[in-house]
Amino acid sequence: MHTYTLFCVDFDGTIMDSMPAFLHSVRGAARRLGRTPPPEAHISKAMGMGSLTKCFTFIFPDLPEEQTGPWVTAYRDIYREEGAALARPYPGVVETLDALLAAGKRLAVTSNKGEPLLRSGLEDHNLLQYFELVIGEVPGEPKKPDPETWRRRVAPHFPELDVQDVLVVGDGEPDMAFAKALGAAACLATYGYGPMERLKGYNPAFQIDTFSDIANWL
């Protein structure tokens, strides 16, 4: 079986159970901007869409995309001040990251979460130390699934590696489409937030039911 050197790991829904933080922050943003939050079942379907703009236009179908700026700002403020404390690493994440490093693997976080929130989330749970590279959403920079994210933001940090050495691990369409665009192998985190039946249509090389299952491919 082919072995992989670099594991490009998503954050929300892959190593971090952040649904409680997401729900809290969306509801808070809605109330701050004078709207009644819709039911939890509807909000939760927006998790993993790849951008907050897409999330809010899904949650509130009458909200024009060009008017989502204040929503994104309110969400990030509330997430930073209140929501982040509600997120937790999935069971087995720390032990699995330890095992990956012990096996000589290299680790990067590739997320579409705003980079300041991403870094603080990793720091809050003592996870930042495991990753050589942390890539989040930065204005003006490419993000998943754009392959320029790899070429401009990831590959320069690992110049000796080829995409065949990379395993993209995530629970969302941005992850599966990113791997496909690169020609890299994908690992679908079926315990995450994405629309799993559609994501399985990308034919990921692996599927995991817990993050710890990655240890099977060391």
Image (cartoon, rainbow, N blue to C red):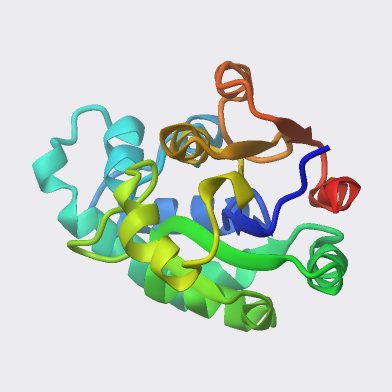
Q: Choose top left, top right, bottom left or bottom right for residue 126.
A: bottom right
Residue visible at 18% across and 58% down in the picture:
70
> Can residue 167 be seen in this snapshot?
no
Q: Which x, y percent locates residue 198?
A: 55, 18
> Can residue 126 be seen in this snapshot?
yes
**43 and 90: which is toward the camera:** 90
* Quadrant including the N terminus: top right
Q: In this view, does 217 lie above or below 209?
A: below
Give the side of residue 207 with respect to residue 110, left or right. Answer: right
**217 and 110: which is toward the camera:** 217
Q: Is residue 160 above or below residue 213?
A: below
Q: In this view, does 189 lie above or below 23?
A: above
Residue visible at 57% across and 65% down in the picture:
108
Residue visible at 64% across and 28% down in the picture:
204
Give the side of residue 127 with respect to residue 214, left or right. Answer: left
Give the side of residue 171 with respect to residue 56, left or right. Answer: right
Q: Which x, y percent locates residue 21?
A: 55, 59
Q: Which x, y percent locates residue 117?
A: 44, 72
**174 and 125: which is toward the camera:** 174
